[in-house]
Image (cartoon, rainbow, N blue to C red):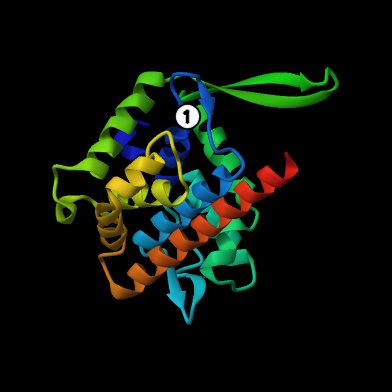
Protein backbone atom coordinates (compact mmCIF):
# COMPACT_ATOMS: atom_id res chain seq x y z
CA UNK A 1 0.00 0.00 0.00
CA UNK A 2 2.05 2.99 -1.21
CA UNK A 3 1.63 6.30 0.66
CA UNK A 4 -0.58 7.75 -2.07
CA UNK A 5 -3.15 4.97 -1.66
CA UNK A 6 -3.43 5.27 2.11
CA UNK A 7 -6.93 6.16 3.25
CA UNK A 8 -7.55 9.39 5.12
CA UNK A 9 -8.01 7.64 8.51
CA UNK A 10 -4.80 5.64 7.99
CA UNK A 11 -2.84 8.78 7.13
CA UNK A 12 -4.18 10.60 10.18
CA UNK A 13 -3.18 7.71 12.42
CA UNK A 14 0.35 7.58 11.01
CA UNK A 15 0.75 11.34 11.39
CA UNK A 16 0.07 10.93 15.12
CA UNK A 17 3.38 9.07 15.48
CA UNK A 18 6.29 11.03 16.91
CA UNK A 19 9.09 9.62 14.74
CA UNK A 20 11.77 10.88 17.14
CA UNK A 21 10.36 9.22 20.27
CA UNK A 22 8.72 6.41 18.27
CA UNK A 23 5.45 6.75 20.16
CA UNK A 24 1.90 7.80 19.34
CA UNK A 25 0.71 11.18 20.59
CA UNK A 26 -2.79 12.29 21.51
CA UNK A 27 -3.98 8.77 22.29
CA UNK A 28 -6.86 9.99 24.46
CA UNK A 29 -8.71 11.31 21.41
CA UNK A 30 -6.92 9.67 18.48
CA UNK A 31 -9.83 7.28 17.89
CA UNK A 32 -12.13 10.27 17.36
CA UNK A 33 -9.76 11.79 14.80
CA UNK A 34 -9.42 8.51 12.92
CA UNK A 35 -13.21 8.03 12.84
CA UNK A 36 -13.63 11.61 11.61
CA UNK A 37 -11.19 10.85 8.81
CA UNK A 38 -13.18 7.79 7.78
CA UNK A 39 -16.48 9.69 7.82
CA UNK A 40 -14.93 12.50 5.78
CA UNK A 41 -13.48 10.20 3.13
CA UNK A 42 -16.76 8.34 2.73
CA UNK A 43 -18.62 11.64 2.42
CA UNK A 44 -16.10 12.95 -0.12
CA UNK A 45 -16.54 9.76 -2.14
CA UNK A 46 -20.31 10.24 -2.08
CA UNK A 47 -20.92 6.98 -0.22
CA UNK A 48 -22.28 8.68 2.90
CA UNK A 49 -24.66 11.57 2.39
CA UNK A 50 -26.58 13.98 4.58
CA UNK A 51 -30.35 13.47 4.62
CA UNK A 52 -32.07 15.96 6.90
CA UNK A 53 -28.99 16.05 9.09
CA UNK A 54 -28.67 12.27 9.32
CA UNK A 55 -25.71 10.19 8.10
CA UNK A 56 -27.11 8.00 5.33
CA UNK A 57 -25.38 5.40 3.12
CA UNK A 58 -26.16 6.15 -0.52
CA UNK A 59 -26.36 2.41 -1.24
CA UNK A 60 -26.36 -0.36 1.39
CA UNK A 61 -24.29 -2.56 -0.92
CA UNK A 62 -21.62 0.01 -1.86
CA UNK A 63 -18.02 -0.91 -1.07
CA UNK A 64 -14.66 0.85 -1.43
CA UNK A 65 -12.32 -2.13 -1.24
CA UNK A 66 -10.74 -0.63 1.87
CA UNK A 67 -11.49 -2.74 4.96
CA UNK A 68 -11.59 0.26 7.31
CA UNK A 69 -13.96 2.34 5.20
CA UNK A 70 -16.14 -0.64 4.34
CA UNK A 71 -16.36 -1.58 8.01
CA UNK A 72 -17.70 1.86 8.86
CA UNK A 73 -20.14 1.74 5.95
CA UNK A 74 -21.52 -1.53 7.32
CA UNK A 75 -21.77 -0.14 10.83
CA UNK A 76 -23.71 2.91 9.66
CA UNK A 77 -26.00 0.83 7.46
CA UNK A 78 -26.81 -1.57 10.31
CA UNK A 79 -27.41 1.13 12.94
CA UNK A 80 -30.31 3.45 13.57
CA UNK A 81 -30.06 6.88 11.88
CA UNK A 82 -27.77 9.33 13.66
CA UNK A 83 -26.38 12.78 13.02
CA UNK A 84 -22.72 13.34 12.10
CA UNK A 85 -21.55 14.45 15.54
CA UNK A 86 -22.46 11.19 17.36
CA UNK A 87 -20.76 9.12 14.65
CA UNK A 88 -17.42 10.81 15.39
CA UNK A 89 -17.41 9.20 18.84
CA UNK A 90 -19.77 6.19 18.70
CA UNK A 91 -17.71 2.97 18.84
CA UNK A 92 -14.83 4.95 17.34
CA UNK A 93 -12.22 2.55 18.71
CA UNK A 94 -13.56 -0.08 16.30
CA UNK A 95 -12.32 2.08 13.42
CA UNK A 96 -8.99 2.75 15.14
CA UNK A 97 -8.45 -0.98 15.71
CA UNK A 98 -9.25 -1.68 12.05
CA UNK A 99 -6.75 0.96 10.91
CA UNK A 100 -3.99 -0.50 13.07
CA UNK A 101 -4.70 -4.03 11.86
CA UNK A 102 -4.60 -2.79 8.26
CA UNK A 103 -1.28 -0.99 8.81
CA UNK A 104 0.21 -4.09 10.45
CA UNK A 105 -0.83 -6.17 7.44
CA UNK A 106 0.79 -3.63 5.10
CA UNK A 107 4.05 -3.44 7.05
CA UNK A 108 3.73 0.08 8.45
CA UNK A 109 3.38 -1.26 12.01
CA UNK A 110 4.43 -4.33 13.94
CA UNK A 111 2.19 -5.76 16.64
CA UNK A 112 4.10 -7.01 19.68
CA UNK A 113 2.27 -9.01 22.32
CA UNK A 114 2.90 -8.11 25.95
CA UNK A 115 1.35 -8.53 29.39
CA UNK A 116 0.19 -5.64 31.54
CA UNK A 117 1.29 -6.09 35.17
CA UNK A 118 2.60 -9.45 34.03
CA UNK A 119 -0.93 -10.82 33.86
CA UNK A 120 -3.21 -9.26 31.26
CA UNK A 121 -2.49 -9.84 27.57
CA UNK A 122 -2.13 -6.70 25.49
CA UNK A 123 -0.68 -5.54 22.16
CA UNK A 124 1.96 -2.88 21.69
CA UNK A 125 2.34 -1.33 18.24
CA UNK A 126 5.78 -0.51 16.88
CA UNK A 127 6.32 1.84 13.94
CA UNK A 128 8.27 0.01 11.24
CA UNK A 129 8.28 2.45 8.33
CA UNK A 130 9.59 5.62 9.94
CA UNK A 131 10.78 7.16 6.67
CA UNK A 132 7.32 6.71 5.11
CA UNK A 133 5.70 8.59 7.99
CA UNK A 134 8.28 11.36 7.79
CA UNK A 135 7.61 11.69 4.05
CA UNK A 136 3.88 11.82 4.74
CA UNK A 137 4.44 14.55 7.33
CA UNK A 138 6.58 16.57 4.91
CA UNK A 139 3.81 16.43 2.29
CA UNK A 140 1.19 17.47 4.85
CA UNK A 141 3.35 20.38 6.05
CA UNK A 142 3.55 21.62 2.46
CA UNK A 143 -0.25 21.61 2.32
CA UNK A 144 -0.34 23.60 5.56
CA UNK A 145 2.32 26.13 4.65
CA UNK A 146 2.11 26.41 0.85
CA UNK A 147 3.28 27.56 -1.60
CA UNK A 148 0.60 25.62 -3.52
CA UNK A 149 -2.63 27.67 -3.62
CA UNK A 150 -5.45 26.15 -1.60
CA UNK A 151 -7.58 25.93 -4.75
CA UNK A 152 -5.04 23.48 -6.20
CA UNK A 153 -4.88 21.23 -3.10
CA UNK A 154 -6.88 17.99 -3.40
CA UNK A 155 -9.96 17.69 -1.20
CA UNK A 156 -8.45 14.69 0.64
CA UNK A 157 -5.19 16.51 1.39
CA UNK A 158 -7.12 19.56 2.52
CA UNK A 159 -9.25 17.42 4.85
CA UNK A 160 -6.15 15.70 6.25
CA UNK A 161 -4.59 18.94 7.45
CA UNK A 162 -7.87 20.56 8.51
CA UNK A 163 -8.83 17.58 10.68
CA UNK A 164 -5.34 17.23 12.17
CA UNK A 165 -5.45 20.89 13.17
CA UNK A 166 -8.97 20.56 14.62
CA UNK A 167 -7.78 17.64 16.76
CA UNK A 168 -4.67 19.58 17.85
CA UNK A 169 -2.40 16.90 16.43
CA UNK A 170 0.85 18.51 17.52
CA UNK A 171 3.06 16.10 15.53
CA UNK A 172 1.80 17.97 12.46
CA UNK A 173 0.27 21.26 13.57
CA UNK A 174 1.51 23.00 16.72
CA UNK A 175 -0.48 25.62 18.63
CA UNK A 176 1.78 28.24 17.06
CA UNK A 177 1.03 26.83 13.59
CA UNK A 178 -2.71 27.02 14.22
CA UNK A 179 -2.42 30.73 14.95
CA UNK A 180 0.08 31.47 12.20
CA UNK A 181 -1.86 29.61 9.50
CA UNK A 182 -5.39 30.23 10.78
CA UNK A 183 -6.66 31.73 7.53
CA UNK A 184 -5.16 28.95 5.42
CA UNK A 185 -6.61 26.28 7.73
CA UNK A 186 -10.06 27.79 7.33
CA UNK A 187 -9.55 27.83 3.57
CA UNK A 188 -8.43 24.18 3.65
CA UNK A 189 -11.57 23.29 5.59
CA UNK A 190 -13.66 24.98 2.90
CA UNK A 191 -11.66 23.17 0.23
CA UNK A 192 -12.36 19.81 1.91
CA UNK A 193 -16.04 20.16 1.09
CA UNK A 194 -15.73 22.11 -2.13
CA UNK A 195 -17.60 19.52 -4.26
CA UNK A 196 -21.09 20.50 -3.09
CA UNK A 197 -22.71 22.78 -0.50
CA UNK A 198 -24.05 19.71 1.31
CA UNK A 199 -20.56 18.22 1.59
CA UNK A 200 -19.21 21.51 2.91
CA UNK A 201 -21.80 21.34 5.71
CA UNK A 202 -20.81 17.76 6.51
CA UNK A 203 -17.09 18.61 6.70
CA UNK A 204 -17.80 21.53 9.02
CA UNK A 205 -19.93 19.35 11.30
CA UNK A 206 -17.37 16.54 11.47
CA UNK A 207 -14.56 19.03 12.12
CA UNK A 208 -16.55 20.70 14.89
CA UNK A 209 -17.30 17.31 16.46
CA UNK A 210 -13.59 16.45 16.48
CA UNK A 211 -12.82 19.72 18.23
CA UNK A 212 -15.46 19.03 20.88
CA UNK A 213 -14.25 15.43 21.40
CA UNK A 214 -10.64 16.59 21.65
CA UNK A 215 -11.50 19.21 24.26
CA UNK A 216 -13.56 16.72 26.26
CA UNK A 217 -10.73 14.15 26.18
CA UNK A 218 -8.17 16.73 27.28
CA UNK A 219 -10.43 17.90 30.11
CA UNK A 220 -11.03 14.32 31.23
CA UNK A 221 -7.30 13.58 31.21
CA UNK A 222 -6.55 16.71 33.25
CA UNK A 223 -9.28 15.85 35.76
CA UNK A 224 -8.07 12.28 36.05
CA UNK A 225 -4.52 13.39 36.76
Q: How many marks?
A: 1
At x 64%, y 72%, the residue is 80
Outermost residue toward the right in this view: 119
Q: Which quadrant of the figure has residue 123? A: top right
Measured from the top left, where is residue 60 in percent x and y?
A: 51, 66
Considering the numbered disc 1 on the image, is that residue within a helix, a strand or a loop? strand
The image position of residue 29, as x and y in percent, is: 58, 46
Q: Is residue 113 visible?
A: yes
Classify residue 73 as left or right of residue 199.
right
Say which quadrant the N terminus sits in: top left
- Crowding around mark 1 (Cα neighbors within 10 Å: few <14, some 14 to 19, many 20+) is many
Q: Nearer the viewer, residue 180 or 172?
A: 180
Residue visible at 14% across and 42% down in the picture: 147
Quadrant location of the C terminus in the rendered image: top right
In the picture as drawn, the residue positioned furthest to the bottom comes out as 52
In the foreground, 178 or 29: 178
Using the image, determine if residue 84 lies above or below residue 70.
Answer: below
**For mark 1, what is the residue?**
17
Q: Residue at x 33, y 49 (%)?
A: 179
Eyeballing the image, is 175 above or below 130?
A: below
Amino acid sequence: MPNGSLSLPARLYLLAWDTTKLKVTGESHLHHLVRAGALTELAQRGLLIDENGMVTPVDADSRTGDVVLDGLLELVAESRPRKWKPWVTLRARVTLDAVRAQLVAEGYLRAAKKRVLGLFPSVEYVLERVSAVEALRTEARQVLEGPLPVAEVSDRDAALVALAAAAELRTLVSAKDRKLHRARLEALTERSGAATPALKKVIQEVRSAVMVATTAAATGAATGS
